Image (cartoon, rainbow, N blue to C red):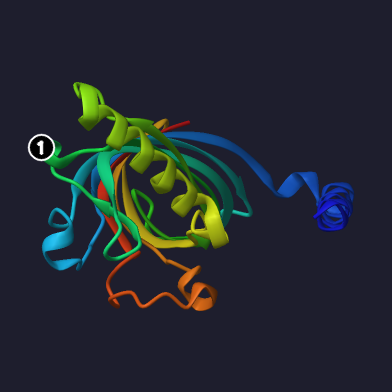
Amino acid sequence: MKRYIQIAACILMLFATNFPLKALEGIQWLARGGMLVLPEDNGMESDPSPILFSPGAAARLSFFHYFALEISLDFYMTHYLYSDTLDRAVPAAIENRSAFVIGSVLGIQAVYLFKPLDSWTIRVYAGPAIDIRISLTAGGLEGADQKDAASQTKKVSSYFWEQGRWLYPVAGIGMDFAVNDDLLLGFDLRTWFPMYKLWTKEDLPDINGWRFGAGFTITFG
């Protein structure tokens, strides 16, 4: 891992020292919010697919009028339990909760910008993302329920962090409409890909692990 970090640092330094400064157009800041869908097909072992509110923010560094690099951070919260029958973490209704999970999805995307009109921008983007999930024992439980929930929470946390299940590359498309020179309003459609399914070899339903998001954006600067 250390070797890969060193190689990435060298590439970044080479890029930074050779990239023409005149290509740099500036930084834009984004605030956004929308709905995040976590589709699941676990039968009676879990709650139906969670549909969650997901706020977020991003910083976009633009070059050449048509290319940008974007760093984004999105949040969500939901409940999980650990199914011994399926041997995996699954969504839980609040009455069956064991773990309270706080997700922070950190991504970096390459963005292509296309302007059919001066006041209208279409964005197409993709890049790597990771889901930094913090699993806490759900509150409001007592006695044996609390003890069982604490045990399940450890299993939920281990499941999320094992075998690269935190890796979620993202791709999306968005449109922005200029309100004035310093303010854009827009919307996004995004898909996160469960890359870990390529190597974990779990017997999972096809839809499990995928994520879909839709929401609005406000761009400043």
Q: Quadrant of residue 193?
A: bottom left
**Looking at the picture, does residue 7 appear above or below residue 92?**
below
Residue depicted at x 19% and y 68%? 41
Tag 1 residue: 95
x and y, in percent, of residue 108 in the image? 57, 50
**Front in this rendered view, residue 52 or 127:** 52
Along the line of sight, the residue nearer the viewer: 98 or 197:
98
Query: Which quadrant is home to the N terminus?
Result: bottom right
Q: Position of residue 71 (x, y in %)?
A: 55, 43
Which of 198 and 157 lies nearest the eye of the viewer?
Answer: 157
Q: Secondary structure at mark 1?
A: helix
Residue at point 82%, 58% (across, down): 4
In the rendered view, would you say 204 is above or below 71? below
Residue 146 lies left or right of residue 126; in this view the side is left
Which amino acid is tagged 1? Glu
Question: Is residue 91 something that shows in the picture?
Answer: yes
Query: What residue do we see at 35% from left, 33% from top?
Result: 150
Residue placed farthest to the front in the image? 144
Residue 6, horizontal then vertical, whole percent: 88, 52
The percent coordinates of residue 205 (x first, y second) are: 28, 76
Residue 110 appears in view: no
Answer with the quarter of the image where residue 95 lies.
Answer: top left
Label 1 crowd (10 A; few <14 / some 14-19 / many >=20):
few
Q: Is residue 22 left or right of residue 45?
A: right
Reply above or below: 3 against 32. below
Q: Exactly how many numbered labels are in the figure?
A: 1
* Residue 191 falls left or right of residue 15: left
Tell me where residue 164 sits by quadrant. Answer: bottom right
